[in-house]
Amino acid sequence: MTGRVLHVRSIWNGAISFGLVSIPIKLVNATESHSISFRQIHTEDGGRIRYRKFCELEDREVTQGEIGKGYEDADGTIIPITEEDLSSLPIPTAKTIEIVAFVPADRIDPLQMDAAYYLQASGAPAAKPYTLLREALKRSNKVAIAKFALRGRERLGMLRVVGDAIAMHGLLWPDEVRAPEGLAPDANVTVRDKELDLADALMDTLGEVDLEDLHDEYREAVEEVIAAKAAGEALPQAPEPAAGGKVLDLMAALESSVRAARESRGEEAGEHAEVKSLPQDKTARAAPKQTGGKKSTSAAKKTAAKKTTASAKKSTAKSGQGTKKTASKSTAKKTTAKKSASRKRSA
């Protein structure tokens, strides 16, 4: 989120109803779109394609000032509706954001989130009650649920504190959110602990990200194409697709993902236990570990794979033999080196 001052035209003026407290506010958009817009053109000569609005009764083009709203009844009759008709609706939310409850933020399903707005205090009389509501929201660690009317219909909203301001997220009504029935796999799938361990390792390797570091690469690429065409230059070429077919082995895909994620973060191979590719042969993968001085190649690879997991305790519980392993990565590394040297001497 940038720290620049907002100078945005308000899209709605009214008040917040907080019990008997009324807070005059202006509603402004909290987000903006940076997507590139295209015009429709006639491909033969590049001429702009424009739409003209005609009255079907008079068969003539009309101006924007002559256009209003109308509701079409079941029998096709048009009932004119004016802005004055809508502004005088007999409901309290016509010009008021009416707070109806305060709930924990985790009670709100993100699927219900809609457009976001900032609530701007309107004039000096709003300063004190606005600040009161903001501080009350902060101290309660809750969000306010409100009802308001905008663009011809009543909506739900969620008020929360953002910096020193109060923001409102439009919420869909619960019956507007579809249930995800029938979307999950209906097959009986079993996920093994080793697969979960590697998924954990991949999540830990990818780590967190500062959202400020992310940007719209698609828009930048489109801008490059536009600039090249305007200058009569060659268009930038798309990168060659990665070689290789479809990965069918989930373990191999997870191991490759962990390896690639570490390389992208600039981590040296020696900083973490190396992730070895598991054998593709099902028989070799199912072979039991050998007890004693020598271990099979398959068992050694499995041991190395276990050491890549994010939880050293899980790896210790699964191995259950040999020297005790600690959660320290350096100890795991030394243990791996000693075992390799031992196998070489035995050979």
Image (cartoon, helix red, strand yellow):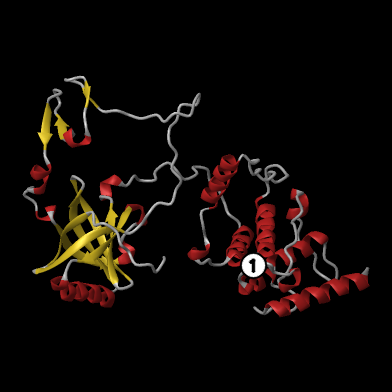
Q: Position of residue 253 (x, y in %)?
A: 67, 52
Q: Quadrant of residue 124?
A: bottom left
Give the crowd class for mark 1: few <14, some 14-19, many >=20 residues within 10 Å: many
Q: Position of residue 289 (x, y in %)?
A: 77, 63
Amino acid type, residue under disc 1 in the picture: Thr
Quarter occupied by the N terminus: bottom left
Q: Secondary structure at mark 1?
A: loop
Q: Position of residue 184 (x, y in %)?
A: 47, 45
> In the figure, 265 relative to 313: above or below?
above
Q: Position of residue 5 (x, y in %)?
A: 34, 67
Q: Nearer the viewer, residue 215 or 183?
A: 215
Q: Nearer the viewer, residue 63 or 290?
A: 63
Q: Quadrant of residue 141?
A: bottom left
Instruction: State the residue position of label 1.
Output: 309
Q: Say whether residue 277 is left or right of residue 133.
A: right
* Residue at figure coordinates x 37%, y 54% from the top left: 32
Q: Nearer the viewer, residue 272 or 319?
A: 272
